[in-house]
């Protein structure tokens, strides 16, 4: 029988952490302050033109945005609002949610013709769907569309001709809301900014922007980068009101030290889940699977380093490491497991326990395997398909994705290949802040990060370098000190394997 893997404890749950209703109350206050600033603008007593509600992953920011839309529409000085984002997968759920509240004749989803066949069934019952400005109902008070659609040449004039000006007397809309604002680059925001006199940006400051802004492509003014996230151009200005949502709904309490390591410059960060609120009930497993999954099931962020593997094709394309993962996953999925979670009311107070066995998943995927490169995800997808076919797994148990594609998504258990695994240096891709942050902040129950042994040696030997993991402009690559701080939050174990050992047949 194989020996158990011994895990070195990570950072403990902070003594000052607030949970449940106490954590949510702080979010309510921050959201109310941002809403009050918006009401001040609409009432003509404030001069802000940007209002930013900054959040960590899983803070309930889309809920806050919907509430702010409602407050704006209730103001007599607001005739209509626009809601935009970088991707349709962000706009469409908002359209359905707002349509369910205000009625399909008042909420209009503005999409390109090529997106019509991709829309979910029944969306016409929730909102009005159009592809041209001339078809937007005059009764519409909310118009939603991606930034690319709003900034089509002469679209603003066509929409002005159709709808006229808002209550402000000059612009079509009275407020422009931007969901997942830190994903939208400045050059795209510049194309939609003119739709309203005030823009409200809501989003996760740790999201990856559409392209890596580590190199400033604008050669004239080094203080201006059209490819960075647009809110960073306005933070700190007297015409900008910025507030942070200081609590997150997504992680376990035991993962809070990791999240604080990513958002280290915030005044505080708390989580709604209390210690022990989310667990995973495991079958009786053999080692080393027993000790690895027991570590993950406790809710702590878990890092497993593997030594003795055969050579990889590349640092981020690592079939031998995925083969080892398969040997760990097979017994877990073969025997089955159950995720257990405390449910909460809107105020964050516990309501009761919910259980979900792995043979009957609902909602978010149970397990997602994340990697940074498409080739690595192709290999992980092969793993997923093998285990799904072999074990007859139902849909939603096991999924593979690139980190970049999975941002904005949620799952119960994340298994990720560390972006630095097998690397020989910190380059702009594998040490990007957003890529590592998205990797580590998707899970509600368990986080297992896999890496070849040698992360500490890589970081100890890396050249000192500057880094601005939150601020812009400039590189968003993480310096070694920040990587070391993040790694110190994990509970860590190491396992040795024989090179000839492949995945189970």
Image (spheres, rainbow, N blue to C red):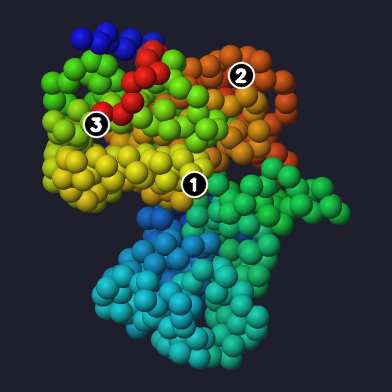
| x then y, percent, for residue 91 | 43, 65
Q: Nearer the observer, disc 3 or disc 2?
A: 3
Q: For mark 3, does the 10 Å Cα neighbourhood hold few (<14), some (14 to 19), or many (20 or more) residues?
A: few
Q: Residue drawn at (49%, 62%), measured in percent from left and top?
A: 87
- The residue identified by callout 2 is 459
Instruction: Say left or right for 107 vs 267.
Output: left
Q: Is the N terminus in the top left, top right, bottom left or bottom right quadrant?
A: top left
| Camera-nearest residue between 238 and 393 | 393
Instruction: Say left or right for 481 vs 354.
Output: right
Quick one: label 3 or label 2, which is nearer the N terminus? 2
| Among the 4 quarters of the image, the one containing residue 196 | bottom right
Which element carries disc 2, helix, strand or loop?
helix
| Distance of label 3 from label 2 (alpha carbons) | 36 Å
Q: Is residue 233 visible?
A: yes
Q: Residue drawn at (33%, 26%), measured in percent from left and top?
A: 502
Q: Residue drawn at (43%, 74%), measured in percent from left and top?
A: 115
- The residue identified by callout 1 is 374
| Distance of label 1 from label 3 (alpha carbons) | 25 Å
| Distance of label 1 from label 2 (alpha carbons) | 25 Å
Relative to 3, residue 104 above or below? below
| x then y, percent, for residue 357 | 14, 39
Relative to 309, residue 392 above or below? below
- The residue identified by callout 3 is 505
| x then y, percent, for residue 336 | 15, 33
| Among the 4 quarters of the image, the one containing residue 303 | top left
| Camera-nearest residue between 89 and 190 | 89
| x then y, percent, for residue 244 | 51, 43
Which element carries disc 1, helix, strand or loop?
helix
Relative to 288, residue 65 above or below? below
Q: For mark 2, does the 10 Å Cα neighbourhood hold few (<14), some (14 to 19), or many (20 or more) residues?
A: many
| Camera-nearest residue between 445 and 14 | 445
């Amino acid at each position: 029988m194989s020996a158990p893997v011994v895990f070195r404890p990570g950072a403990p749950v902070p003594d000052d952490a607030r949970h449940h209703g106490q954590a949510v109350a702080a979010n309510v206050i921050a959201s109310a302050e941002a809403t009050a600033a918006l009401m001040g603008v609409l009432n003509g007593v404030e001069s802000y033109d940007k209002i930013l509600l900054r959040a960590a992953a899983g803070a309930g920011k889309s809920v806050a945005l919907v509430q702010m839309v409602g407050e704006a529409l209730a103001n007599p000085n607001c005739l209509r609002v626009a809601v935009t984002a970088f991707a349709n997968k962000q706009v469409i759920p908002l359209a359905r949610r707002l349509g369910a509240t205000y009625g399909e004749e008042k909420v209009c989803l503005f999409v390109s013709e090529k997106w019509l066949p991709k829309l979910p069934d029944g969306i016409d019952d929730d909102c009005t769907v159009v592809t041209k400005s001339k078809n937007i109902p005059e009764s519409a008070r909310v118009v939603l569309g991606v930034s690319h659609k709003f900034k089509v040449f002469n679209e603003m004039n066509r929409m002005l001709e159709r709808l006229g000006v808002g209550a402000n007397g000059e612009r079509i809309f009275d407020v422009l809301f931007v969901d997942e604002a830190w994903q939208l680059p400045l050059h795209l925001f510049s194309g939609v900014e003119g739709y309203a006199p005030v823009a409200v940006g809501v989003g996760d400051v740790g999201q990856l922007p559409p392209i890596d802004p580590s190199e400033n492509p604008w050669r004239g003014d080094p203080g201006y980068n059209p490819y960075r996230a647009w809110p960073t151009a306005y933070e700190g200005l007297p015409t900008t009101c910025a507030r942070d949502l200081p609590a997150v709904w997504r992680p376990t309490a035991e993962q809070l030290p990791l999240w604080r390591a990513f958002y280290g410059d915030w005044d505080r960060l708390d989580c709604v889940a209390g210690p022990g609120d989310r667990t995973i009930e495991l079958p009786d497993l053999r080692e080393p699977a027993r000790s690895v999954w027991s570590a993950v099931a406790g809710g702590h962020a878990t890092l497993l380093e593997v030594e003795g593997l055969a050579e990889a094709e590349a640092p981020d394309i690592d079939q031998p490491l995925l083969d080892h993962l398969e040997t760990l996953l097979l017994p877990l999925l073969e025997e089955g497991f159950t995720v257990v979670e405390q449910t909460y009311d809107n105020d964050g107070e516990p309501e009761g326990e919910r259980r979900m066995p792995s043979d009957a998943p609902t909602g978010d995927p149970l397990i997602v395997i994340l990697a940074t490169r498409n080739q690595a995800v192709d290999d992980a997808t092969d793993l997923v398909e093998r285990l799904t076919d072999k074990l007859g797994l139902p849909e939603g148990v096991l999924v593979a994705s690139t980190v970049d594609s999975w941002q904005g998504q949620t799952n119960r258990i994340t298994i990720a290949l560390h972006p630095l695994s097998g690397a020989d240096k910190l380059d702009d891709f594998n040490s990007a802040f957003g890529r590592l942050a998205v990797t580590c902040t998707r899970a509600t129950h368990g986080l297992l990060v896999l890496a070849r042994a040698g992360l500490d040696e890589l970081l100890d030997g890396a050249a000192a370098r500057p880094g601005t993991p939150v601020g812009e402009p400039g590189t968003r690559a993480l310096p070694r000190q920040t990587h070391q701080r993040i790694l110190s939050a994990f509970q860590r174990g190491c396992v040795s394997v024989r090179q000839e050992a492949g995945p189970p047949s």
